């Protein structure tokens, strides 16, 4: 099976004085604005790092759901946050880390088994596989 999903971006102008928009194939984002301000100065709009964080959190959470199901568990709630760090390095800017934080309610699971399965999901998530950054995971049962 091969699935293609599409995202697109339009930009006009220079880095600081320009701006653009991001769209997704599904229409979840349609010409949503982004620019220097939204990426580096906390101005309105979106940025690639928060979109990557949302994608990684979503992918990991789905992968964990599958991993749990295969082990005979069903989550009542999986709440994942991904903090994506963009930092200036000698070669320019780089995404250096992604910190996943998971708070999970899973009936009947032991803490050590939960940690093992969460680690497997982190390693097996397709977004984790494509990133060349240090990816940490803080997983806790609640």
Image: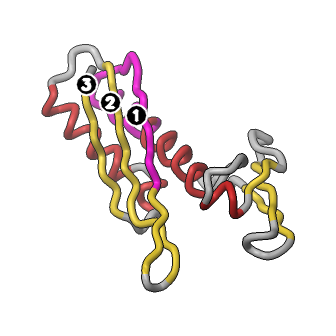
Q: CA distance from mark 1 to mark 2?
A: 5 Å
Side (left or right) of 133 relative to 16: left
Side (left or right) of 91 relative to 107: right
Helix, strand, or loop for circle 2?
helix
Residues shaded magenta: 62-84
Asked whether 35 or 110 is in front, the reply is: 35
Which of pointers 3 and 2 lies earlier in the amino acid sequence? 2
The residue singled out by tag 2 in the image is 68
Q: CA distance from mark 3 to mark 2?
A: 13 Å
Residues packed near mark 2 inside 10 Å, few (<14), some (14 to 19) or many (20 plus): many
Outermost residue on the bottom side: it is 91
Residues packed near mark 3 inside 10 Å, few (<14), some (14 to 19) or many (20 plus): some
Residue 67, by quadrant, is: top left
- Residue 37: numbered disc: none
User: Mark 3 or mark 1, which is nearer to you?
Assistant: 3
- Residue 66: numbered disc: 1
**Percent x, y of residue 131:** 45, 63
- Residue 141: numbered disc: 3
């Amino acid at each position: 099976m091969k699935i293609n999903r599409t995202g697109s971006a339009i930009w006009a102008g220079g880095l600081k004085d320009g701006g653009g928009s991001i769209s997704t194939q599904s229409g979840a984002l349609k010409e949503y604005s982004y620019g220097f301000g939204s990426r580096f100065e906390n101005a309105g709009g979106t940025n690639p790092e928060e979109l990557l964080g949302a994608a990684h959190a979503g992918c990991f959470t789905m992968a964990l759901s599958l991993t749990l199901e295969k082990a005979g568990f069903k989550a009542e709630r999986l709440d994942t946050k991904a903090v994506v760090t963009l930092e200036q390095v000698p070669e320019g800017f780089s995404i250096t880390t992604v910190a996943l934080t998971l708070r999970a309610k899973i009936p009947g699971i032991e803490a050590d088994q939960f940690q093992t399965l969460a680690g497997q999901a982190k390693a097996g998530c397709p977004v984790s596989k494509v990133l060349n950054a240090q990816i940490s995971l803080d997983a806790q049962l609640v």
